[in-house]
Each structure stands twice: as structure tokens, then as C-alpha cells.
Amino acid sequence: MAAALDAAHDTGLESIAMPAISAGVFGYPLRAASAVIVAAVEAWLEDHPDSSVREIRLVGFDRKAAGAFATALEAS
């Protein structure tokens, strides 16, 4: 997660999409994966307040994944 955000920052990107890869499909619980992704993004943003990255889209491939991201964001 941080490596992708670092790469986006290093190339001067302003936005990036972060998918919930492997969440649910390979047995890693979707709810837990969403919480980990949200926490990692928030920690990275705190550590990089002057980054060029201004928009990070958390992408779910279905309504269930999108809902898990929404729940994780509300809990953070």
C-alpha cells in the first residue's frame, strides 16, 4: 500500500486508485482488509502532508467491497 502511494508521490501524481485486491476472494476477510487499507492510507497521508497526491480512491469491485470501505472509513 505504502509503496504504491510512494510511487504515486514520486512521479508527481495527484490521484491514485487503491483496489481491495485479494480481499474476500482468497480467504482474507473483506472487512479486515478494508480496515487495514484505510488505516494504511490514513497513516501515509499523515506522514506525507506535502504530497502531490490529493485524491485516493478506494475501489471495490462490487457493492459489498464498496460497503466495507465505507464502513472502515466511518470507523476511522
Image (cartoon, rainbow, N blue to C red):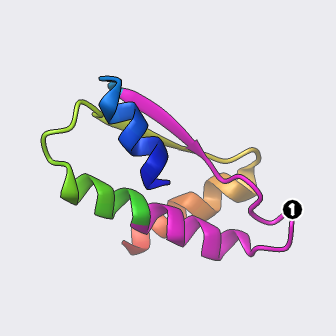
Q: Position of residue 30 (x, y in %)?
A: 71, 69
Question: Can see residue 16?
Answer: yes
Q: From this view, report whether residue 25 is shown above or below residue 52.
A: below
Q: Residue furthest left?
A: 50
Question: In the image, residue 19 lies at what x, y percent?
Answer: 63, 46
Which region shows up in magenta? 15-39
Q: Quadrant of residue 73?
A: bottom left
Q: Does the magenta stretch include residue 26?
A: yes
Neighbourhood count class around disc 1 (C-alpha, 10 Å): few under 14, some 14–19, many 20 upward: few
Label 1 secondary element: loop
Residue matched to label 1: 25
Say left or right for 11 vs 22: left
Instruction: Measuring from the top left, give residue 21's x and y in whole percent.
Output: 71, 52
Residue positioned 74% across, 62% down in the render: 23
Identify which residue, 38 or 7, lies in the foreground: 7
The amino acid at mark 1 is Val
Residue drawn where x is 20% and y is 49% of the image: 48
Question: For the C terminus, which image quadrant?
Answer: bottom left
Q: Which residue is drawn at 86% across and 62% down?
A: 25
Front residue of this view, candidates 7 and 60:
7
